[in-house]
Image: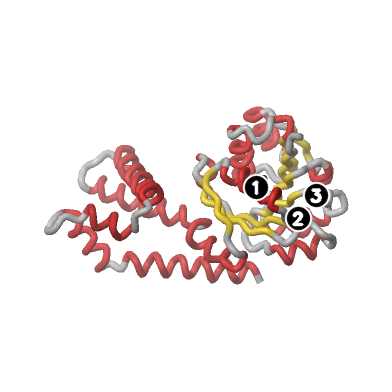
Amino acid sequence: MSTNYAFIGAGNMAKAMIGGILSSGLAAPDCVTASNPSAPKLDALKEEFGIRTIQQGNAKAAAQADVLVLSVKPYLYETVIAEIRDVVKPETIVVMIAAGQTLSANETRFGKPVKLVRVMPNTPALVGEAMSAVCFNANITPEDRTIVMAMLNSFGKAEEVPEKLMDAVTGVSGSSPAYVYMFIEAMADAAVLHGMPRKQAYTFAAQSVLGSAKMVLETGMHPGELKDNVCSPGGTTIEAVASLEASGLRSAVIDAIDTCVKKSQEMSK
C-alpha cells in the first residue's frame, strides 16, 4: 500500500522534501498533499510537482496522512496542532521540522498518544544535500523509523541523535550554511582583490569547499590529516594556515557555534 505524505506549510523546506520524496520514488504525486494559506505557493508546488493541494485545509490534509510534516514556523505549532489533533490517526507519523519544538511539549499539545518525530534539516535540502538530525518519541516503531529515514535520506543525509543534542545540531549543521557562505564570500573577495572576476571567484571558492567536504565524507580521513596533506613544507598553503591560526579562525568558529547553541537552548525552554 502506498504511503500518503501531507505537508502543512508550503515553504522552501517543504518544497525540498517533496522534491526528494518524488525523485526517489517513495511516492507518486497523487500521494502527496500540501496545505497552506497562500494560493500562489500551492499553485507553484502543483505546477512543479503535480501534487495535490488544499488551501486552508490543514485538518483535511492531516486526516488523510500516513506521514504528516509540520512545515510551519515554531510560533504556529500551538495553533496548527489545536486545529488538527482530533483528526490525526493513531498510526500517523507526525514529523516536526521547527527549531525549539521538543517532543514532550508537542505530545502535551496533542493531548493523546501520537507518533512524533523531531527533525533538524538545513537549507542545502534545496539542492538535495541536506544534513538532517532526527529523534523519535516512544511510540515510533522500527517500521516507522525506516519510513522516516528513507524520507530524510531522499534529500540529503540523515542521522539519529538523542534529543539532548538537537541544540548542538542547530549550531553545527542547522545554522552552519550561513557560516560557510561567509567563508566562500571572503575567499572570493580575496581572489577579486588579486584580479579575478567576481563570478569566477565564487565558482573557484564554492567548488573548493564542495570538493573538500566530499573528501572528508568519502575518504573517512581526519580533517587535520587532509589539511596536512595540502601543506607542503615552506609552501604557500602552510603560510596561509599560519595566518588563519594567528587570526583566530578556530576560536572564532567555536565561539560562533557556542553562541548559536546557547540561543537554541533558550528557544527550547
Amino acid type indicated by mark 1: Thr
Circle 3/circle 1 CB separation < 8 Å: no
Q: Earlier in the sequence, mark 3 or mark 1?
A: 3
In front of the other: 9 or 4: 4
In front of the other: 209 or 243: 209
Amino acid type indicated by mark 2: Lys
Instruction: Examine the rendered structure and indicate whether residue 233 appears above or below residue 38.
Output: below
Name the residue at 64% across, 53% down. Answer: 97
Residue 91 badge: 3
Amino acid type indicated by mark 3: Glu
Secondary structure at badge 2 equals strand
Residue at label 2?
Answer: 115
Q: CA distance from mark 2 to mark 1?
A: 14 Å
Callout 3 crowding tier (Cα within 10 Å): few <14, some 14–19, many ≥20 = some
Q: Position of residue 144 (x, y in %)?
A: 70, 49
Name the residue at 34% across, 55% down. Answer: 221
Instruction: Examine the rendered structure and indicate whether residue 44 appears above or below residue 222.
Output: above
Circle 2/circle 3 CB separation < 8 Å: yes
Q: Quadrant of residue 264?
A: bottom right
Callout 2 crowding tier (Cα within 10 Å): few <14, some 14–19, many ≥20 = many
Q: CA distance from mark 3 to mark 1?
A: 14 Å
